[in-house]
Amino acid sequence: MLYLAQVQKKGFLGKGELRLLASQKTEHSWTLITKEDIVPFSDTDTFNEGMLVIADLSGSHEGRKVVSVKDAKDWVLDIMQKFLKDGITPAFLQQETERAEQWRQSLTLQSQELNRRSLELEARREQIQMLEDSLKQEKKLVESMVAQQNSDPKHKG
C-alpha cells in the first residue's frame, strides 16, 4: 500500500523512520492519517530529514515493512500541474463542494416528496379498494333483495 510520508532521523546515529501522513485508497483517492503513525526506516542516508517521500509498505499495521521509497517531489509537482492546468483552486473546490451539497439536499427533498406522494397514492388506492368492496357488498344486498322480492308470492302479479 502506498503512503505519503516524511523522513525523520533520530539521535546522533540518525536512526531513521517514516512518519506516515496519508494513505492511498484508490488511484486518485488519498486519506489523511490523523494520528501519529511511524514506521522504522533504515535507508536515511539517501533521503534528507523532513523530505516527503512515497513509501510502498507491505504487511499489516503492526508488521509493516518498507518495500520501496521514492522522492515525492515529482508526484507532488504532477498533482499541482494537473490542478493548476485545469484551474482547480481551493475556491473552485469549495464551490464544487457547496454545489454538490445543494444537489444532495435537493435530491433529498425530491426523494421525500416522492415518498410522500407514494404514500398518498397508496392511501387513495386503499380507499378506492374499500369503496369497491363496499359497492360489491351493496350490489349483493340489492340483488339478494330483488331475488327475494321476485320469489315472494305476495309480490307476484
Image: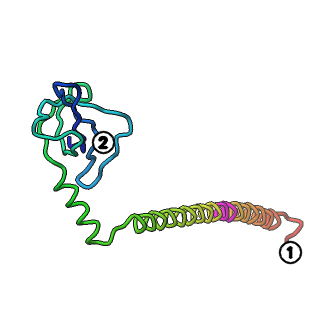
Residue 9 higher or lower than 30, as above or below = above
Mark 1 nearby-residue class (10 Å; few <14, some 14–19, many ≥20) = few
Label 2 SS:
strand
Report the predominant secondary structure element of the magenta stretch: helix
At label 2, the amino acid type is Leu
Identify the residue at the far right of this view.
154
Measure the C-alpha gap from mark 2 to mark 1. 103 Å
Quarter of the image with the C terminus in it: bottom right
With respect to residue 92, does 76 lie above or below?
above
Towards the viewer: 152 or 82: 82
Residue indicated by mark 1: 157
At x 34%, y 40%, the residue is 33
Rendered location of residue 22, percent (x, y): 30, 44
Q: Residue at x 27, y 31 (%)?
A: 38
- Between 143 and 119, the one nearer to me in the picture: 119
Image side of residue 16 versus residue 152, left or right:
left
First of labels 2, 1 by sequence position? 2
| Vertical comparison of 79 with 53: above or below | below
Residue 45 x %, y %: 10, 35
Which stretch appears magenta? 123-129
Q: Secondary structure at mark 1?
A: loop
Q: Which mark is residue 21?
A: 2
Q: Quadrant of residue 4?
A: top left
x and y, in percent, of residue 127 in the image: 70, 62
Q: Is residue 99 left or right of residue 110?
A: left
